[in-house]
Image (cartoon, rainbow, N blue to C red):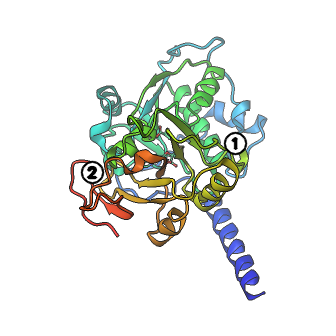
Amino acid sequence: MMYYSRLAFSVLLLRFAAAFLCHSSSSTRIGLQPRFMFVDYGLGEYSQEVIDSSKSNKWGIPASETLPPLSSTPKAQLENGGKVTLVGSGPGDPELLTLKAVKLLQDPDALVIVDRLVSPEILNLIQGEIKIARKLPGCAELAQEEIYWWAHQGLAAGKHVIRLKIGDPFVFGRGGEEVLKFRKYGVESKVVPGVSSAFSAPLLANIPVTHRGAANQVVMCTGYGREGTSPDLIQYHEEQTIVFLMAVGRLRELCDRLVTLAGYPKDTPVGIVEKAGCPSQRTVVGTMETIADMAENHKVQAPSTIIVGKVVNVLLNTDDEGEAIQGLIQSASQSDPILSSD
Ligand SMILES: C[S@@+](CC[C@H](N)C(=O)[O-])C[C@H]1O[C@@H](n2cnc3c(N)ncnc32)[C@H](O)[C@@H]1O
């Protein structure tokens, strides 16, 4: 009884926190140095008209589908010079950016609309205006609407709008949705690929996603489907690697379901790579049976990539007896020595 009332209280507290975060003002700064300011364009004549004629949401932002097209047919560049480029920022290490991305980020006239998880080291390279998406828990849809609103205002002002997205823009990042939306606004986006965490996070933790005799196929999967649903499970295949993105928040449930519903042996190796490519990168290695407790003990958080399959142990199998390493492996990068494990 006591347990349930505590649980109910915690749920209430979480709801309150999410509601508070979703209501906080758009000038909130998210852990950044003072140089990063949110710029208020003000409501120009066109914006006021748009706001008056559209259904605005609780952040006071007009619904993205009511924003008017800025050209009758999609163009790479509007008459006023406005254009959009979606750019992949890779997993977090600025040295993993493409040269094209660095060049674009150094344009002092660009408006750069940044995903929340882009690393501060990469933000430091930006020379133009920066706006940071407020995709806090419970606010994803509102924040996406705000991104469209910022982009629309930037385009109407003739700016080069750069949508800086983590990893690769077209891997679980709504990149395709954004291209379609900008097309409705009369702009055909350019897209610059980035290094996806789906492949770089395992690599940076010394986990090859394919390896002869261990895995001849790789499946990339999200932990959350639309509106928080669980996507269909991939059935067990001995020589297969599954890379899960956006799944660390429901790791225990995911492992239970893979074992009970998809035929995974309880000793299937599982690795989690947290903040790959960042100075605080950590890896936790266990099995289907142990990994959820380990992740809880080590307080593993997003952004993390989960790797399931025999490949997890291929290169981490380095102790004297040839036993697979289990537990926390702290390694600042792939080239650094393993500092500790338990
Ligand atoms: C919305 S998805 C975007 C994926 C991104 N487009 C990509 O290609 O990497 C966000 C998820 O990517 C993974 N991710 C992104 N950056 C990461 C990092 N530095 N380390 C580990 N996983 C990361 C996490 O699973 C996170 O929940």
In the drawing, does residue 207 fall left or right of residue 306? Answer: left
Q: Is residue 298 above or below residue 278?
A: below
Q: Nearer the viewer, residue 19 or 128?
A: 19
Q: Which mark is residue 232?
A: 1
For mark 2, give the secondary structure. Answer: loop
Q: Determine crowd level at label 1: few under 14, some 14-19, many 20+ residues with C-alpha closer than 10 A.
A: few
Which quadrant of the view contains residue 3? bottom right
Q: Nearer the viewer, residue 211 or 180?
A: 211
Q: Residue at x 41, y 60 (%)?
A: 284
Q: Amino acid at mark 1?
A: Asp
From the image, tell me which residue sits under label 2.
333
Task: Name the quarter where the N terminus is drawn.
Answer: bottom right
SS at mark 1 in the image: loop
- Left or right: residue 144 compared with residue 111: right
Q: Position of residue 39 (x, y in %)?
A: 47, 45
Residue at position x 47%, y 54% in the image: 269
